Amino acid sequence: MSGKIVALLGSPLLEGNTARLLDEAVRGAGDAGCEVEKIAVARLNFRPCMEIFYCVENETCRIRDDMTGMYDKFREMDGLIVATPIMTMGIPGKLKSFMDRFQVFYMAKYHRGRSFIPPERRKARRMLFISISGMNRPDVFEGAKMTVKAFGRIIDCPYWGEVLQNDMDTIRDIRTRPEVMEAAYRKGCELGRLAAGGGPP
C-alpha cells in the first residue's frame, strides 16, 4: 500500500539550502512508494492563533483561511517531514504560527480526551526533522527540536529521525556536502517505507 506524507518547508526561500535537503527527502519518500505533498508555509495566507477557544468544543477552527484545509491533511497523513532553517535559536515565526494553529488538535487530545488520530494509526505515524543553521555551536538545534517534538506530540506524529547541518555560514551551499544530501534522501526513503507499511529497510 502507498502512504501519504506531508512535507513542510519552513524556509521563506523556495530554492535555498533547506529546500534542497527537503527535496531530497521528498524524492526518497516518493521512491519508497509514497504520495508526498509539499507545502511552503511561508507562501500560505493565514492568521496566527487568536485563542478564540472555539476549538474547545468544536473539531475545527473558527478562523477561515489557508489553514482550514490543513487539518484534514494532517489527520489523514501517515508521515510528516518538517524542514526549516534555524532563526534566533528557534524556528521561523511563520512556521511557529502554523504549528500554533493546531490548537484544534491540542483541544481534541488533551481537553476532550479524544485524539483525532485512532490508537492503531498513532503507532505508525512518524516525523522526520531536517534543519540547517548558520551558526557552529553544539546547542543550536535544541530550541527548534523542543518545539517540533511538542508539535509532534500534539498531532500524534512523534519525532522519529533527523538530518541536521550547522555551520552553513561557512559551508554556504549544501550541495558541497553530498553526504548530507544523501542522508536526507535515505531518511526520506526510510520514512516512506515505514509510512507505506513496509517496515524498516
Image (tube, rainbow, N blue to C red):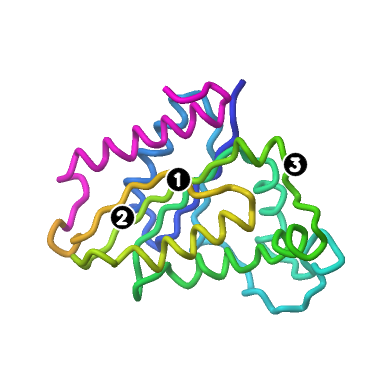
Residue 118 point in image, percent of width and height: 75, 41
Q: Is residue 178 above or below residue 166?
A: above
Of badges 2 and 3, nearer the viewer stands 3
Label 2 and label 1: CA atoms lie apart by 19 Å
Q: Nearer the viewer, mark 3 or mark 1?
A: 3
The x and y percentages for residue 179 are 20, 38
Residue type at mark 1: give it: Leu
Up-down: is 42 above or below 185?
Answer: below
- Residue 26: image quadrant is top left
Mark 1 nearby-residue class (10 Å; few <14, some 14–19, many ≥20): many
Q: Secondary structure at mark 1?
A: strand
What is the CA distance from the residue labelled 2 to the residue labelled 3?
Answer: 37 Å
Instruction: Kindly indicate the quadrant of the structure image that contains residue 100.
Output: bottom right
User: What's the mark number on residue 85?
Assistant: none
Using a 10 Å C-alpha cutoff, classify the residue at mark 3 as few (fewer than 14 neighbours), some (14 to 19) or many (20 or more). few
Quarter in which the C terminus is drawn = top left
- Ranked by sequence position, the earlier of labels 2 and 1 is 2
Residue that label 3 marks = 118
The residue indicated by pointer 1 is 128
Q: Residue 16: give its label.
A: 2
Which amino acid is tagged 2? Answer: Gly
Residue 136 on image: x %, y %: 18, 65
Q: Position of residue 45 (x, y in %)?
A: 60, 66
Region rendered in magenta = 172-201
